[in-house]
Amino acid sequence: MTNDFDDPRITAVGLLFEAHAGLSARFTAQLEEHGFSAVEFEVITRLARSPGNQLRMTDLAAQTSLSTSGVTRVVDRMERDGLLTRRACPSDRRSSYAVVTPSGMQRLDETLPGHLQMIERWFTGQLDPEALSALLDGLRRVRDAVHPCATAGSTDAVPEQETSAGGAPRA
Amino acid sequence: MTNDFDDPRITAVGLLFEAHAGLSARFTAQLEEHGFSAVEFEVITRLARSPGNQLRMTDLAAQTSLSTSGVTRVVDRMERDGLLTRRACPSDRRSSYAVVTPSGMQRLDETLPGHLQMIERWFTGQLDPEALSALLDGLRRVRDAVHPCATAGSTDAVPEQETSAGGAPRA
DNA sequence: CCGCTATAGTTGCTTAGGCAGTCGTTGGGC
DNA sequence: GCCCAACGACTGCCTAAGCAACTATAGCGG
């Protein structure tokens, strides 16, 4: 059999993907304790850090890796659960906003500290500061290269904010 | 609003997840040109690098991040497409092997060079050697920490092989 | 040797999410 | 002011995949 499967490039990808999968699993477990799926948590987080705790559906789709129909459905669920509300956009009657409800903010506040602990425990705390920053530098380079322009979202509205989870200002 | 959302830990995770998402998207596009989904490619790769180009269904489930029922269905599809076959396990009549067919190997051989190019183009080639190895070191540390023991798979059969995509021997 | 528990694989049911098509809205060209 | 292409959101239909239930086998204890 061809041994191309042992190529170091494959190994590298394997490492990245497994680290991602492992972290995802840990996070998912903790988030579920608070009634969030990973997607829901991402959605509510993106909303919560946006001005007015709201975003237009399309922009939300751009910032998450969901399609617009995916966003419609997630917001449906979260609205049903009382975490979000839809609000009509006054300036464009086609658009609507997804807004975090007080109850949603509360759930998020309850969830966040634990989530940060998980990140520290399984990710950032695993490395000494310089190793961590080397890792992040590398990731940033890769991220910028593959940047699907998907995560950037609402690009014309906030051109320089990049990803906002890995935005230039502090990353 | 609480500004915990700007926490550098969140940023770090964002970076890792976005790099992953971006690479996934690139790879998926290229793999689809050869008729593979990402999952199918992972499955056939794991099989192809196993002795005899085969694995028991359970071991395959352990090595991929699929459940056993997930594996059943993927193998169903790939068998239907002529890429794999099921073979009864002589020593345990409950088990069955998934085996890569010659046709499957051929498709894989056609796909692999392009895939390696994609990896190089979007990932490993983005960094100079030392930055890359720093990145990989960091990822390995994280991966080992979160190691879900899922990707390790067939642990009792091949205890030291780790993940085989990021195995110790060469990673 | 018999039965009991654990294991391998499959299947029914359910949910998530994508694509493509629809409907209402907008804004530019004339 | 009118028309039409583009856009935002939503819905129908489909596939993927997980959980739990089920079947068949294995291997151990008595």
Image (cartoon, coloured by chain):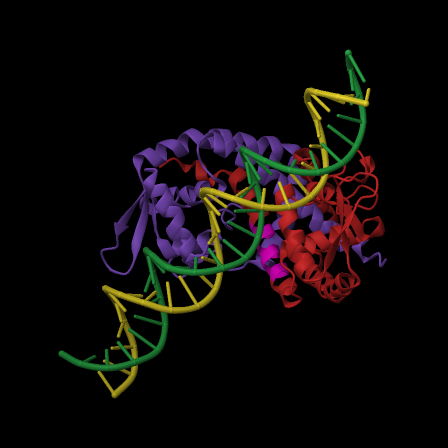
Chain colours: A purple, B red, C yellow, D green
Q: Position of residue B29 (x, y in %)?
A: 60, 63
Decide if residue B126 is in sight here: no
Q: Nearer the viewer, residue B138 or B84?
A: B84
Q: Residue at x 51, y 40 (%)?
A: B10
Q: Position of residue B137 (x, y in %)?
A: 73, 42
The answer to whether residue A93 is above or below residue A111 is: below
Taking depth in this image into account, of D4 and A124 the one nearest to the observer is: D4
- Visible residue check, residue B154: yes
Q: Where is residue B114 shown, x and y percent of the image?
A: 71, 66
Number of numbered callouts drawn: 0
| Residue B48 x %, y % | 79, 54
Classify the position of the N terminus of chain A by image quarter: bottom right
Q: Which residues are magenta?
A: B18-28
Side of A57 where B108 appears, left or right: right
In the picture provided, is B132 more to the left or to the right than A51? right
**In the rendered view, does A108 fall on the left or right side of B81?**
left
Q: Is residue A6 above or below residue B116?
A: above
The residue depicted at 48 percent of the width and 29 percent of the height is A33
Magenta span has B21?
yes
Residue C26 appears left or right of B83: left
Dominant SS in magenta: helix
Q: Is residue B164 magenta?
A: no
Q: Nearer the viewer, residue B111 or A146?
A: B111
Residue drawn at the location 59% of the way across and 52% of the way down: B19
Q: Quadrant of residue D20?
A: top right
Res A127 → quadrant:
top right
